[in-house]
Image (tube, rainbow, N blue to C red):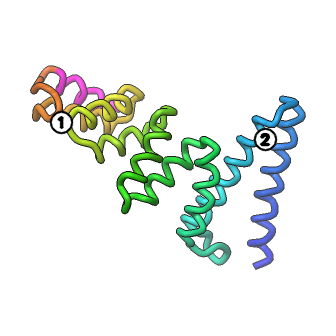
Amino acid sequence: MVLCYLFIYLFFFFQAEDGIRDAQESRGLGDVYKRQAQAQLSLGEYYFNGVENCINIDETEAVKWFRKAAEQGNANAQFNLGICTLEDESVAKSWLRKAAEQGHVEAQYTLGLLGSGMDSVNWFRKAAEQGYAEAQYRLGELYYLGVGVEEDEKEAFKWYHKAAIQ
């Protein structure tokens, strides 16, 4: 158990060190707040995944920390919060959209899965254009089947090929 506390202490010590160094280098609070959001995200991930013999999995606590970081604009936290709130699709989509609009590729892909028609096509395209193979494949499927877009085997082949060569 002592090892567990040492691990947690060192984790937050180095987070604080980085925050202090960032504040000194930038002479502003922006970087410090980014570090705070990153630490909150990390804490949420520890609660979400747990650490053997140290931190028990606690989704409620994870969501609390994800929300703190997400409200500060951290795209990874917004994505995680979106995933954690999938039982309420409108809430989940709201958080996923915030992350996706910052270029978070997994959020874009997930919105493609949750959407329909042209909405799915648009989100899959954003993720596919960033090189996300699964989105490239899904976009190829939509073109092949003509779902949300006009059926186009040439366009389907293009996206299948991009996904396949990764």
Q: Mark 2 — residue?
A: 32
Q: Is residue 160 magenta?
A: yes
Q: Position of residue 129 (x, y in %)?
A: 37, 26
Q: How many labels, in total?
A: 2
Q: Nearer the viewer, residue 38 or 68?
A: 68
151 left or right of 65 in image: left
Q: Is residue 50 magenta?
A: no
- Name the image quarter holding the N terminus: bottom right
Distance in Å between CA atoms under marks 2 and 1? 44 Å
Residue at the far front in the pictured view: 90
Residue 137 visible here:
no
The quarter of the displayed image where residue 160 is located:
top left
- Name the image quarter holding the C terminus: top left
Q: Amino acid at mark 2?
A: Val
Above or below for 28 versus 114: above
Q: Amino acid at mark 1?
A: Glu
Q: Mark 1 — residue?
A: 141
Magenta-tinted stretch:
155-166
Q: Position of residue 73 (x, y in %)?
A: 60, 41
Residue found 63% across the figure and 53% down from its top: 41
Secondary structure category for the residue under label 1: helix
Residue found 12% across the figure and 23% down from its top: 152
